[in-house]
Amino acid sequence: MKNTILAAAIEEVTLRGLRFTMQDLATRLRVSKRSIYENFSSKEELVSYMVDAILTDMSTQEQAILEAKTSCINRLEQLLTVHPYEAEMFNKNIYEDLRRFFPKQWQKVEAARQLRLQRIEQLLEAGITARELRPVNVGLISEVIKSSFDSFTSYHFLEQNKLTYKEAMESLLSIMLEGIAIK
């Protein structure tokens, strides 16, 4: 039942963001709120379960990318654009709402982002060692990517530039790898 509730909660977040109510969820599932509360003691617990499921999915994808036998550049591109399938269509205010209304859950997201940055740094260093990438200041690249993560989780930035998170990361990677000069 927890996974059924999770799937319905993801649909609610896609539609309403994190401002959905447990009654909205019960209506979607055609069950009583009590049935939901038998599985999750609070909305906070449900959101925690959702965040954990999404972050676990992303971590699994990231690990598979790192272990793949492809070029460093290919793995870097894949790693930078990992995005959970469930969250692709989330209401665009999700990151801001998570930060504001569920700070403990946002801390989990921040920890996962930090782990991803560490993985990216390791991949950059491996690419430099393997001579697939030219020697660059990995800390500088990491900071650019971190700042991009911050901008790309802002609804206003993405909306203003008519981009999805994935499109923004793909463009950033293209600029980082190919520059902006016409050759």
Image: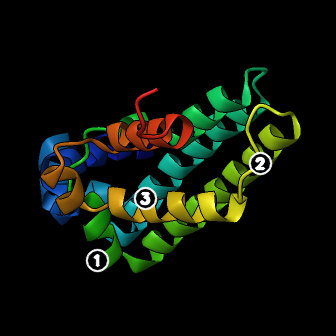
Amino acid under label 2? Pro
Mark identifier at residue 135: 2
Q: Amino acid at mark 1?
A: Phe
Q: Amino acid at mark 3?
A: Ser
Q: Secondary structure at mark 2?
A: loop
Distance, label 3 to label 2, CA atoms, is 21 Å
One can see residue 93 in this view: no
Residue at (22% x, 59% y) in the render: 157
Query: Disc 1 and disc 2: Cα gap in Å?
Result: 42 Å
Q: Is tag 1's residue or tag 3's residue first in the polypeptide sequence?
A: 1
Residue 96, above or below 128:
below
Query: What residue would you read off at disc 3?
Result: 148
- Give the crowd class for mark 3: few <14, some 14-19, many >=20 residues within 10 Å: some
Could you tell me which secondary element the residue under label 3 belongs to? helix
Residue 8 or residue 122, whichever sits in front: 122
Residue 76, visible in the rendered structure: yes
State how far apart marks 1 and 3 are (Cα). 23 Å
Q: Are marks 1 and 2 in contact (CB under 8 Å)?
A: no
| Viewport quadrant of the N terminus | top left
Residue 172 in picture, x, y percent from top left: 43, 44
Mark 3 in CB contact with mark 2 (< 8 angstroms): no
Classify residue 10 as left or right of residue 121: left
| Relative vertical location of residue 44 with respect to residue 175 in this rendering, above or below | below
